[in-house]
Image (spheres, rainbow, N blue to C red):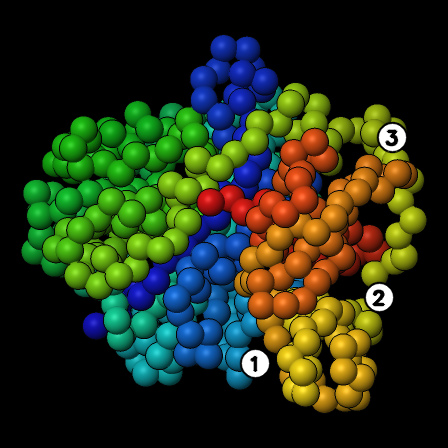
């Protein structure tokens, strides 16, 4: 039976106190840093999911988001390249709906059942914008989740699913819109969310002959925790004992990734034999009946939700958040000078192995690891005698660091475990917190956006846990 082999998640390190949005609001929400977007967060979630997994065993990668940085270009290929997966895998993007994540999961499970793939990676990631001073700005958050779907070594079996669609203008965004639009809240909840999600869940329980008491937890998307409790109560679940915490005050609503991130949080607490009911919402609803297997105990070594929530930094003020999201009117932001060269497609393609999976080279004669790739070994002098090695998943230590005097960017040299040294940008920290010898790891980030090109590369960050 198809199921979840491995899981992972990513929550940005940065948090915005809701009190900065409107005085008196409680809690905080996770926000992507200035060099993060749905792509970089998706890469981080996939790498968390891949811990302990043979990358060569993966036959496909599905990416789901409503906030892809490109309208015409596959994001799944960027993530597959950064994760250093095989080239002969099937990639696909799912978009335009908050249900895109669960739709990708269902498609992956169906592909595995049909035999067209043995293992498919599903990643959902969203970085949605609410207009300033809008309710959506208050509740939204950024994040990503990833699941490896297959039939062997399954930690969670997918017992059944049930889907319905519902054509309704409740939450939407056109290709010209920056911010999410939404109709009046009572209309969304009473005509859309409550009856539609309830219908999908009821349909699933009828199909499986299971009742609310058979499930350990209901893991469901919601705009509002009070409506989620109302949904659960109306279906016969005990909101106090059976509802997965929607994490509204620590993470926020992460859109397409939201139900899958909540599922990761539920799996971190689940034990063998637990039955979980997962439900999404967005122009309909997808509901899944899941059963946790004993294999789950061998699959705990992930950062998931817990570790990422514990590792955080607060944004100092609301203006910083607006600037990061490019929400200030033109002319109000005076950027420091940057001496960038514009991104060029041919060298990006030519150097794709050096850029996306961060491949260095290892000398076949003396074993010296070098980055960037060279033709002549700096240690033994042998020429064109190298093999490519992946450095993106290697931890390291900080050898030296400095601040670039014009832009204020942090730069440093990282010595990788097993060999190799790299001069790179440092992010998610402050100069005063850096120390020679501190543990570092690599994180896939956006370096620059110009000429319509999102230019990604790896930066060093202090190890989060």
**Label 1–label 2 contact, CB within 8 A:** no
Q: Quadrant of residue 79?
A: bottom right
For label 1, the crowd category at 10 Å Cα-Cα, with few meaning under 14, some 14 to 19 and many 20 or more, is few
Q: Residue 246 carries which label?
A: none
* Residue at the image point whose x is 38% and y is 41% from the top: 306
Q: Earlier in the sequence, mark 3 or mark 2?
A: 3
Q: How many marks can you see?
A: 3
Tell me the distance, in whole angstroms, between the alpha carbons under discs 1 and 2. Answer: 23 Å
Residue 346: where, in percent of width, then height? 82, 74
Upstream in sequence: badge 1 or badge 2: 1
The residues tagged by marks 3 and 1 sit, at their Cα atoms, a distance apart of 43 Å
Residue 232 appears anywhere in the view:
yes
Residue visible at 59% across and 18% down in the picture = 20
- Secondary structure type for disc 3: loop
Q: In this view, does 36 lie to the left or right of 216?
A: right
Q: What element carries label 1?
A: loop
Image coordinates of residue 236 in percent, x first then y, are 12, 36
Q: Is residue 196 shown above or below 64?
A: above
Query: In front: 277, or 4?
Result: 4
Q: Which residue is drawn at 34% across and 62% down?
A: 6
Measured along the vertical axis of the image, is residue 52 above or below residue 441?
below
The residue carrying pointer 3 sits among few (fewer than 14), some (14 to 19) or many (20 or more) residues within 10 Å by Cα, namely few
- What residue would you read off at disc 1? 87
**In the rendered view, does 387 fall on the left or right side of 54?**
right
**Residue shown at the point (62%, 61%) measured from the top left:** 416
Q: Name the residue under label 2.
A: 344
Query: Can you tell which mark lies on residue 334?
Result: 3
Which secondary structure lies at badge 2? loop
Q: Distance between the residues labelled 3 and 2?
A: 26 Å
Q: Is 424 rendered above or below residue 116?
A: above
Task: Judge whether residue 196 can be spotted in this image.
Answer: no
Q: Where is residue 97 in the image (x, y as percent from the top left)?
A: 47, 51
């Amino acid at each position: 039976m198809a199921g979840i082999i491995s899981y992972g998640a990513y929550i940005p390190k940065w948090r915005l106190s809701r009190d900065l949005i409107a005085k008196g609001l409680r809690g905080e929400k996770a926000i992507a840093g200035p060099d993060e977007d749905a792509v970089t967060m998706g890469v981080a979630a996939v790498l968390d999911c891949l811990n302990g997994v043979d990358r060569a065993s993966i036959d496909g990668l599905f990416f789901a988001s409503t906030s892809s940085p490109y309208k015409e270009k596959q994001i799944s290929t960027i993530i597959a390249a950064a994760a250093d997966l095989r080239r002969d895998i099937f990639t696909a993007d799912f978009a335009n709906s908050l249900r895109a994540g669960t739709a990708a999961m269902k498609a992956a499970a169906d592909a595995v059942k049909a035999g067209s793939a043995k293992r498919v990676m599903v990643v959902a990631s969203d970085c949605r914008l609410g207009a300033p001073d809008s309710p959506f700005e208050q509740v939204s958050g950024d994040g990503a989740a990833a699941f490896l779907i297959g039939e062997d070594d399954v930690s969670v079996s997918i017992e059944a699913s049930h889907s319905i669609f519902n054509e309704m203008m409740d939450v939407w965004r056109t290709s010209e819109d920056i911010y999410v639009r939404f109709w009046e809240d009572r209309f969304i909840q009473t005509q859309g969310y409550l009856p539609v999600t309830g219908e999908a869940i009821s349909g699933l329980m009828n199909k499986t002959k299971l009742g609310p008491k058979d499930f350990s937890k209901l893991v469901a998307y919601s705009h509002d925790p009070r409506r989620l409790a109302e949904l659960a109560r109306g279906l016969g679940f005990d909101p106090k004992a059976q509802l997965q915490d929607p994490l509204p005050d620590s993470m926020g609503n992460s859109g397409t990734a939201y139900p899958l991130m909540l599922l990761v949080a539920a799996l971190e607490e689940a034990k063998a034999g637990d039955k979980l009911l997962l439900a999404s919402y967005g122009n309909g609803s997808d509901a899944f009946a899941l059963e946790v297997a004993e294999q789950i105990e061998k699959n705990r070594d992930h950062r998931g939700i817990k570790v990422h929530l514990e590792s955080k930094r607060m944004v100092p003020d609301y203006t910083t958040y607006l600037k990061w999201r490019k929400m200030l009117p033109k002319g109000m932001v005076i950027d420091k000078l940057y001496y960038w060269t514009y991104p060029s497609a041919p060298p990006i393609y030519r150097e794709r192995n050096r850029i996306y999976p961060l491949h260095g080279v290892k000398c076949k004669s003396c074993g010296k690891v070098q980055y960037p790739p060279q033709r002549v070994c700096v240690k033994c002098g042998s020429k064109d005698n190298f093999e490519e090695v992946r450095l993106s998943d290697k931890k390291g230590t900080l050898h030296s660091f400095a601040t670039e005097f014009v832009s204020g960017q942090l730069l440093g040299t990282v010595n990788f475990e097993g060999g190799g040294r790299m001069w790179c940008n440092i992010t998610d920290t402050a100069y005063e917190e850096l120390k020679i010898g501190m543990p570092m790891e690599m994180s896939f980030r956006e370096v620059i956006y110009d000429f319509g090109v999102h230019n990604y590369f790896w930066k060093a960050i202090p190890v989060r846990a």
